[in-house]
Every structure is written in C-alpha cells, then in structure tokens.
Image (cartoon, helix red, strand yellow):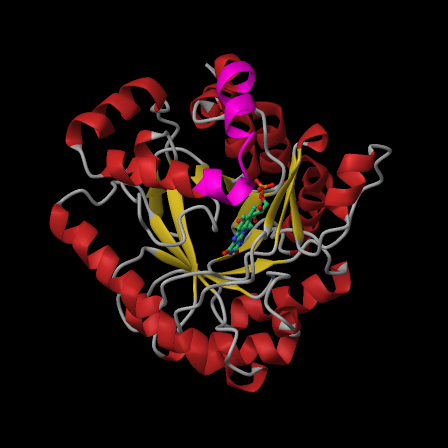
Amino acid sequence: MSVLYRNLVRPVLFLQDSESIHNRTLRMLAFAAHHKSLRALTKAIYGASEKPLEVFRLKFPNPVGLAAGMDKFAAALPIWECLGFGFTELGGVTWHTQPGNEKPRMFRAIPDRALINRMGFNNPGAEAMARTLAEWKGSGNWPKHPVGVNLGKSKTTPLEKAAEDYANSFRALRDYADFFVVNVSSPNTPNLRQLQEKAALDEILVALQQINTAPKKPILVKIAPDLSFEAIDEILDLATQRQLAGIVATNTTIARPQSSDQKVQSIYAQTGGLSGAPLRERSTEIIRHIHKQTAGKLPIIGVGGIFTAADAREKLEAGASLLQIYTSLVYEGPAIVKTIVAGLR
Ligand SMILES: Cc1cc2nc3c(=O)[nH]c(=O)nc-3n(C[C@H](O)[C@H](O)[C@H](O)COP(=O)(O)O)c2cc1C
C-alpha cells in the first residue's frame, strides 16, 4: 500500500502546493469522518492491530498517535482512529481566532523527507474548537481512543499575559479532551519559545493547575529540540512540583542539516520549523536525556522523524511511552500507522 502511495499517489499530490494539498486532503478526510460507511471502509483498509497500553491513567489501543498541527480545526476527528492511530492530538489552538502567517508557509524538502512550516497557529480559537468538539460528542462519533488538545499562545497576547491566555483556552476546552499539551515550543509565534524559561513556564502551569479541578486532566509540556540539556533539566524541575503528566519531545527545529542539493538548500533557507527525517536523531537524544534524568518516571511522548517501525522502536528504547507522527504521514501515506504498529509487535 505504501509503495502504491509513494509511486503513484504522492507524485500527483506533490505537484500541488504543500498547504493546498493538505487542505484538500483534510476536507476529504472530514467528509469521510461524517459518513459511517466511509469510516468503516477506512478502518477496514487502514485500521491497526491492537497493542494496548496505559499511560497517565488513559488507555491507548496502540502507542502511535497523530501529532499536533494536522487537524487544527478538529475537522476530521473520528477518522484518525480509523487510520489506525492510538490517539489524536488536535490543535494547536489559541484563545483568539487567528489566520496564521502569510502564505506560502509550508514547504517540502523531498529528498530529505522533511517539511518546513511557519503556519503560525492558524486556528479557529478555543471557543469555536469547543463548539466543534461538542458537535462531535453529540454526533455519537467521538473516537474511542484518547483525544488531546495542543494549546498555544495567541499572537496578539503579550508574553506577560501568556498564562491567562493559556488558562482561557484550557477553561473552554477542559471538559472535551482527555489530555492537554502546553505548547511553548513552536518557532512560529514571535518569542513563544521564551516561555520555556522556568519562571515563565511555571506561571502558566500554576494558572492551569489552579483551574484543573476534578476530574483532573493530564497536562503535558511540549519542548523544542533546540533546547540545551540544562534548559530541559529546568523544565523537568517543574514536573513534580506542578504535577506534569509528561513531556512531548519534540516540536520542530530551527536548525538545518547540511545539503548539497541546491533545491533543498533553498527550502532550508525558509524561515520556520523543520520536521521529518532530519529531526529524528536529535529528538531521540532528548527523549533519552529526559528518561535518564527522571529515572523513567515521567511519561514521554516521542515525536520527530518517525517513518518506520525501527524509528519507532528507537524512540521507545530511548524511553518514550507513546509516539506521534506528522511528516511521515505526508511522505508515506495513510498505511503508515498500520505498518508501524505491525512492526512493533
Ligand atoms: C505543518 C505543521 C504544523 C504543525 N503545527 C503544530 C502545532 O500547532 N502545535 C505543535 O505543538 N506542533 C505542531 N507541529 C509539530 C508536530 O506536531 C511535530 O512535533 C513535528 O512535526 C515533528 O514530528 P514529525 O517529524 O513526525 O513531523 C506542526 C508540524 C507541521 C509539519
């Protein structure tokens, strides 16, 4: 199936601009998500085998989840489990509706199996997202696997008011999702990554935990691969104090690999975060570091450059409990989850 996708479908899709094809695919998946027969067909073709596990008191049918950024509007929510995913992370969502950065803002470096994006949190805003999630709940088609929401900061909110911005989104969405990810690591909102600094992050986590009343929702922090181990250790200091459920490692990187290919070089000159194969090693290194520093006690969602079962196993062996993919879904097509999960058994 992946061979068919790679040799027949992908070349046609890749003739089009990266974001246009993303939007078209999402519309198709959203259509399928609304129709029982199409959901059943998708599941029959792409559904993954069970490899159940429990992490932060949630039950996952398998460890491979959809990474944040793919379904920012929750437009296709029920389809992701039909595509074999063991969990879905929706968003990034911000308190205010935002259009994101000017287009073009998503680029493919095909020979390197990488993407660069500077989307800048284009999203409907937390309240609109809550309404969409309420509709999915009401439809009876809510997925059986855990659903998380990735929270970002609105561009117009100054850094000093960040805690309030995250708290507003969390309050609006708290009842709908099973877990939340505080995203302080996107390179595409000016200065956002300064919120990874201990005092600033602490303020956000305090604000969230204050309104995280029973039943308490697991709250994780997503970090950048560009942090030093010392900076990561500062974040880990907050884990116990602020009852973090885990760390998502990692977001995209602002670093660029070497390339002798001129086309790739021109893509790498674009501003934004790099994802995909070139991110794999650094992300695994960070997972290994967190696992060591926390003596394996803090759950880690490993994300960055997972294309194969071997890549997935590498991250699990480094200490990740759960995994996520984004870029490999674009490059390898919809059979990828099933293939990875089968390879993990
Ligand atoms: C187009 C695009 C949009 C993304 N948007 C978000 C986002 O809103 N929030 C977030 O935390 N991560 C976002 N990410 C990062 C991914 O969730 C993931 O951490 C990163 O792409 C590395 O995984 P991958 O190599 O499997 O793609 C985005 C990635 C891409 C390519």
View extreme (bottom): residue: 160
Verify whether residue 174 appears in magenta: no
Q: Quadrant of the N terminus?
A: top left
* Residue occupying image coordinates x 13% and y 47%: 139
Query: Is 305 positioned to the left or the right of 337 in the image?
Result: right
Look at the picture and state if 121 lies above or below 343: below
- Is any atom of residue 86 visible in this view? no
Residue stretch in magenta: 6-22
Can you give x and y, in whole percent of width and height, for residue 304 in the image? 61, 42
Q: Nearer the viewer, residue 335 or 203?
A: 335
Residue 36 as seen in the image, left or right of residue 169? left
Q: Name the residue located 71 percent from the left edge and 32 percent from the top edge.
A: 112
**Taking 272 as reference, is 162 above or below it?**
below
In the figure, is residue 243 to the left or right of 308?
left
The secondary structure that dominates the magenta segment is helix
Task: Give the mark count.
Answer: 0
Quadrant location of residue 84?
top left
Judging depth in this view, the residue of 139 and 178 nearest the camera is 139
Q: What residue appears at the point 75 percent right and 59 percent down from the top-left corner? A: 229
Residue 123 location (% of width, % of height): 41, 61
Judge left or right: residue 318 versus residue 259. left
Residue 141 occupies which quadrant of the picture?
top left
| Residue 160 image point, x, y percent | 56, 86
Q: Residue at x 32, y 18 (%)?
A: 45
- In the rendered structure, does residue 13 fall within the stretch colored magenta? yes
Q: Position of residue 187 (x, y in %)?
A: 64, 61
